[in-house]
Amino acid sequence: MAWCPKCKSEYVEGITVCVDCGCELVDSLKKDRLPEEEREYFLEEIQTAEEPADANEFEFEFDEEDVPERKSHTVYMNNEERAEENRTSAYTLLTVGGIGLIVIVLIFMDVINLHMSVTNKYMVTGVMGVLFLLFVIMGIVSMKNSRILKRKASKENKLTIEIKKWCVENIRKNQVDESLDIMGQPEELQYFQRFDYVKKLIQNQFVNLDEGYLERLIEEIYPEIFEENGE
C-alpha cells in the first residue's frame, strides 16, 4: 500500500502521487514523520531560537531614586563628645548617690522615721546604702574617664585640624572629577565616588585612622572641598 505523508490518505499500489495534495506517496507512515508544513514551522522556530538575542532587549532605565543612601557602618562619637557624656553621667550618679546616702543616714539615725522594726530598718538601710554607694563609685569612675578622654580629645582635635588643612590644600574638585570621570552622572553617585576617592587619599597620607572617625571627618570636609572650594 502507498500513503500520502501530508493528508495520510491510503492508495493502492501503482499510484505514486496524491490526487488531493500533489505530494509523492510513501510506502509507510512513520510516527515521527511530520507533514511538510509542520516541518517548515519547526525549522523556523529552531532558527529563531538559535539567533543571538539583541542586547537592546535587556536595557532598562536607571532610576535615580533607586540609588541607596550612603550610611556609615557606625556612628562615630569623638573623644570630646565621649568626655562630655561621661562627665554628665558622673554628675548624675554622684548627685543621686550622695542624696541617697544622706537619706539612708537620716533614716538610720531615726531623723526620718519610717515606722518599721529595727530588723527591717537595718535591712532596708543596708541594701539601699550599698546601692547608693555603688552610684557614687560609678560616678567617680565616670569622672576619671571623662578627664582621660578630655586629654585624648585634645590630641584628636589637633589631628583633625591637620587632616582638614591638608585636604583643603591638596584636594581640588576639578582634579577629583577628572580622575573619576563622573561628569553627567547622578549627584548621588558622584558623592559616593568622591567620598571613597578622598577616603583613599587621606588613608595614604595618614595611616591607622579609625574608620568611623575618618568617615565622619570626610562628611564634615566634603562641602568645603566640593561646594565652597570647588575650583
Image (tube, helix red, strand yellow):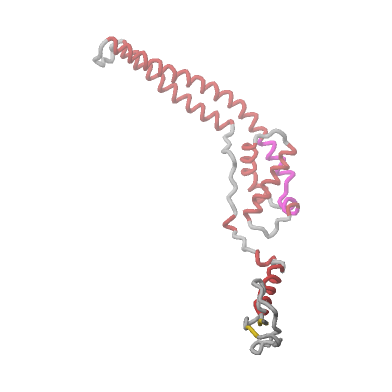
> Considering depth in this image, is 174 or 58 the residue closer to the camera?
58
Q: Position of residue 161 (x, y in %)?
A: 67, 36
Marker count (numbered): 0
- Displayed quadrant of residue 216: top right
32 inside magenta stretch: no
Q: Which residues are magenta?
A: 160-178
Specify the principal SS of the magenta part: helix
- Displayed quadrant of residue 41: bottom right
User: Viewed as shown, does residue 207 lie left or right of 130?
Assistant: right
> Considering depth in this image, is 50 or 53 the residue closer to the camera?
50
163 inside magenta stretch: yes
Q: Is residue 38 above or below residue 129?
A: below
Q: Position of residue 121 (x, y in %)?
A: 30, 13
Q: Is residue 141 above or below residue 77?
A: above
Q: Residue at x 66, y 78 (%)?
A: 35
Q: Position of residue 120 (x, y in %)?
A: 29, 13
Q: Residue furthest left?
A: 115
> Considering depth in this image, is 1 or 70 the residue closer to the camera?
1
User: Viewed as shown, does residue 134 lie left or right of 51?
Assistant: left
Q: Residue at x 62, y 63 (%)?
A: 61
Quadrant containing the N terminus in the rendered view: bottom right
Q: Residue at x 64, y 31 (%)?
A: 156
- Displayed quadrant of residue 221: top right
Q: Position of residue 69 (x, y in %)?
A: 58, 50
Q: Is residue 79 above or below residue 191?
A: above
